[in-house]
Image (cartoon, helix red, strand yellow):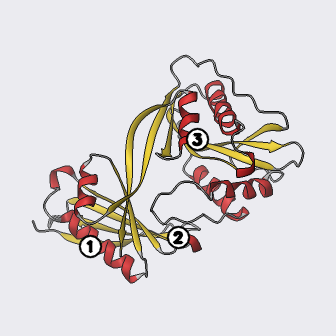
Amino acid sequence: MTFRLTALTDPAESPSARRLAWLAAAPDGTPLGSAFLRLFTSPNQAHLGELALDVHPAERRRGAGSALLAAAVAAARADGRRALLAQAVEGSPGDAFLSAHGFERALVLAFGRLDLTAAAPALAAELPPGYRLVSWVGDCPEKWLPGFTRSRTAMDDMPMGDTGFGPVVWDEARVRSAARAVADRGELLHTVAVAEDATGDLVGFSELVLPADRRGDAQHYGTAVLPAHRRRGLALAMKAEAIRWTRAEHPGITGLLTDTAEHNTGMLAVNRALGYRDTHRCATFRLPL
């Protein structure tokens, strides 16, 4: 098959990455597929690139995907990256493509959905003594910003399998930038956190992002509790509050989506207790460069 690749540069850089892109097109200009390569700039991820590659189903098995992959791999190597990550639904054509091109499974995520159109289950999700819930919509209030930034280290030991994806370094500027990115898309960020009464510190958080039209499914981003405060029901209480708030304030939201590493048994148990049901599994693949 005859096609050409056009290299593109995404002008929208984030504080933690920049992105390259390629378009595969037929001689008449008809798009066949694309590849996007995210090059992380944060210190703990600067050795990695992340690939998103897609070819139109009618144009697959004709070489466009392999050519797009080769372009991305060459660019990643030229930039000094040591590995490339990519994700695909288990059993999908993307799964087969990545496996055939030398990628190895590094992490499996279990995806789930909570149906908000069903009756709310009876659930005891009370906080233990010494803790209280706080919440906000959009940007983190100045009062909570230092503590919220510190609480994000609760994600540092999140199971990441063999991806080589190190801890994400957060500061107050990055926290505000992440909230601003959600707002710029017209979406709504809702955060529930747990404050420890004795210190006033935030010791856990759970984020939920609602679509711009406030209809359909919303997406959980991150839920985490600092190690010293785990196994006390804090994650369950935070997610339960996010569910209660969504039902009360946004009846157009019909479901909540979540994804969890398959060996993160604690969070999987929280999701099951809240009524989430498995939908599919995705594998994160890693290609050494």
Label ID, residue 70: 1
What's under tag 2, amino acid-wise?
A: Gln
Which tag is nearer the camera, tag 2 or tag 1? 2
Q: In which quadrant of the rendered image does the C terminus lie?
A: bottom left
Q: Residue furthest right?
A: 198
Observer-nearest residue: 60 or 229?
229
Give residue 219's position: percent from left, percent from top. Answer: 53, 41
Left or right side of 41 for 237: right
Q: Is residue 211 above or below residue 284?
A: above
Q: Which residue is mark 2?
A: 45
| Left or right position of 224 against 214 | right
Is 89 located above or below residue 157 in the figure?
above
Which percent across, then down, holds residue 123? 64, 22
Residue 102, quarter of the rendered image: bottom left
Q: Amino acid at mark 3?
A: Gly
Residue 266 badge = 3
Q: Nearer the viewer, mark 3 or mark 2?
A: 3
Q: Nearer the viewer, mark 3 or mark 1?
A: 3
